[in-house]
Image (spheres, helix red, strand yellow):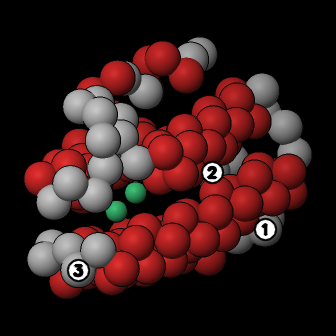
Amino acid sequence: MPTFDDIWTDKMYTGIAHIDEHHKKLVRLLLAVHAEQQKGGSHERLREILAELVSYTKYHFVAEERLMLEIKYPGLPDQRQAHQDFSAELNERFLSLSIKDERLPGELFEFLRGWYADHILKHDLDIGVFMRNQALLSGHS
Ligand SMILES: [Fe+2]
Ligand SMILES: [Fe+2]
C-alpha cells in the first residue's frame, strides 16, 4: 500500500504555500482512491472519492490559473492547456465508469499518480521559480 511519502517528495515543493497545500491534499485524495480500491469497498464509495478528487482538481486548477494571471506568468497558456487536457481525460475516465462496474480500472491510480507528479515537477515548479526571480516570493524551496 503506497504511503504519502511514496508519492510526495521534497522536490515537489513550489514554495508557494497555498499551492503546496493543494498539491498535498491531491496526494491524500489519490491515496484514498487507492485505499478504497484495495479494500474492495463498494463501487459507490469509490466513485464518491473519485468525484471528490475530480472536483478538488478543478478547484486547484482555477486557483493556480488565477495566480498565474495575477503574476503575469508567461507559461500560463501551456499550463492552461495541460490542465484542460487532463481535465478532459479525467472526466472521460470518470464518466466511462459504469455504476455497475465492480471495480475501477486498475491502471487508474497509476495514471493519476503519474500525471500529478509529472505535472508538478515539469510545470508547477516553474511558477515558483518565476516568482522568486521576480522577487514575488522569498525562500529557496
Ligand atoms: Fe498546474
Ligand atoms: Fe498544480
Give the percent coordinates (x, y) of residue 25. 62, 43
**Residue 40 seen by the camera:** yes
Of residues 3 and 79, the one nearer the viewer is 79
Expressed as whole percent of the image width and height from the top left, the position of residue 34 reads 63, 34
* Ligand 1 in which quarter: bottom left
Residue contact at pointers 2 and 3, CB within 8 angstroms: no
Nearer to the camera, 64 or 3:
64
Mark 3 lies on a secondary structure that is: loop
Q: Which mark is residue 32?
A: none
Instruction: Tell me which label, 2 or 1, sits earlier in the chain.
Output: 1
Residue position marked by numbered label 3 in the rendering: 72
Mark 1: amino acid: Ile
Secondary structure at numbered mark 2? loop
Q: Give left or right: position of 116 versus 130.
A: right
- Report the front residue among 65 and 71: 71
Q: Could you give the CA–CA distance between mark 2 and mark 1, rounded to whole angstroms?
A: 10 Å
The reply to whether residue 105 is in sight is: no
Q: Crowdedness of circle 2 by 10 Å Cα count: few (<14), some, many (20+)? A: many
The quarter in which the C terminus is drawn is top left
Of marks 3 and 1, which one's residue comes earlier in the chain? 3
Which amino acid type is marked by label 2?
Leu
First along the sequence among labels 2 and 3: 3
Q: Residue at coordinates 56% horizontally, 44% vertically from top-left?
A: 21
Q: Nearer the viewer, mark 2 or mark 3?
A: 3
Label 1: how many Cα within 10 Å (few below 14, some 14–19, many 20+): few
Q: Which residue is mark 2?
A: 104
Q: Is residue 81 left or right of residue 48?
A: left
Q: Which residue corresponds to mark 1?
A: 99
